[in-house]
Image (tube, rainbow, N blue to C red):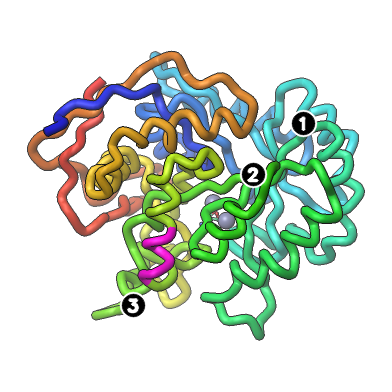
Amino acid sequence: MTTTLTLRRPDDWHLHLRDGAMLEGVLPHTAQHFARAIVMPNLVPPVVTGAQAAAYRDRIMAALPEGMNFTPLMTLYLTEETDPEDVVRAHAEGLVTAVKLYPAGATTNSASGVRDFGRVRGVLERMAEAGVPLCVHGEVTDADIDIFDREAVFIERVLDPIRRATPGLRVVMEHVTTADAVAYVRSAEQDLGATITVHHLVINRNHILAGGIRPHYYCLPVAKRETHRQALRAAAVSGDPRFFLGTDSAPHVDAAKETACGCAGIFTAPNALSVLAEVFEAEGALDRLEGFAALHGPAFYGLPPNEERITLTKGAPVELPERIETGDGPVTVFDPGFPLHWHVTG
Ligand SMILES: NC(=O)N[C@@H](CC(=O)O)C(=O)O
Ligand SMILES: [Zn+2]
Ligand SMILES: [Zn+2]
């Protein structure tokens, strides 16, 4: 029986760090385990320009506790007014790693996102030429499309047309939640990858709704039925380099989740790796954990994998607080619903 695992230090290819007191509260939980993370730009107001990304990166570095090593990989929030030259310059300088597309209204803090995809065509073409990857929140926002269908419809109506119209554009479908998305990514010969969260490998929609409504399992895209969760697990443990870890750890204070209109987002940073190890072990795929968490992401982004190693040790159940305290208030940590035995020990 395997009881210790040594892997290259993982990266998180989709992370929300927020700002101010929340940033200070959550950053150490990611920096403790992950070497780098793609930092989402959906602040209020969003991170739209290279100058704003530089200022946000400085705030992140200022919030990093002494002695911790962590590199934030910055993103720009795509709007219909985005200046292509600013994007290309910020990427060429190494300041910005990717650009993030939020359909307007699709998720938390997406009001400034894109309504008319025709209006960002020029930026996307410049990005394809310059090799700037596009990260996508893949859901349509039409009121007449069922929330459980919004990812699949997005692929057909928005993502596939964009990819066909913009050859060479490298796209990451973020936080995929459906068998449809897994199949679409597998069907692409090049320039398409996908992140998978830890929580979507664990919960299906019953966890949110059966036996009482559980706001801490609510996120977007919303967890789907069990067959989709199975497809995500199969993709994650397959060894296919097009799939890699993006936790989408998305902290909100409990008061904003436990309310009549609770916001979307699950905070997984403290236990993401322990849960992931449990999932890979259950699938008999511990030997593929390093690929998913530490190799496929850097390969997609054209970055070297981390040289540093971490060790996971199997033992008595991991004891984690149910919630962490931040200067903005308490934030509940994702409860996978089963004991975790894998400790990050070094
Ligand atoms: N995933 C979520 O449910 N929420 C994210 C936004 C996002 O990634 O869509 C957030 O910023 O809270
Ligand atoms: Zn999203
Ligand atoms: Zn997210």
Label 3 vs label 1, nearer the camera: 3
Q: Quadrant of the C terminus?
A: top left
Residue topped by disc 2: 41
Q: Tell me, yes or no, whether the highlighted magenta stretch contains residue 8.
A: no
Mark 2 lies on a secondary structure that is loop
- In this view, 321 is above or below 107: above
Q: Is residue 331 rendered to the left or right of residue 116?
A: left
Q: Is residue 21 rendered to the left or right of residue 254?
A: right
**Of label 2 and label 1, which has the lower sequence position?**
2
Foreground of the two, 42 or 341: 341
The label shown at residue 51 is 1
The three-letter amino acid code for the residue at tag 2 is: Pro
Could you say where residue 165 lies in the image, as x and y percent from the top left? 86, 55
Marks 3 and 1, how far apart at CA = 42 Å
**Of label 2 and label 3, which has the lower sequence position?**
2
Marks 2 and 3, how far apart at CA = 30 Å
Could you say where residue 252 lies in the image, as x and y percent from the top left? 44, 55
- In this view, 232 is above or below 309: below
What secondary structure do most residues of the magenta stretch adopt?
helix
The three-letter amino acid code for the residue at tag 3 is: Leu
The residue range painted magenta reads 226-231
- In this view, 326 is above or below 301: below
What residue is rendered at 44% in x and 47% in y? 249
Q: In which quarter of the image is residue 216?
A: bottom left
Residue topped by disc 3: 209
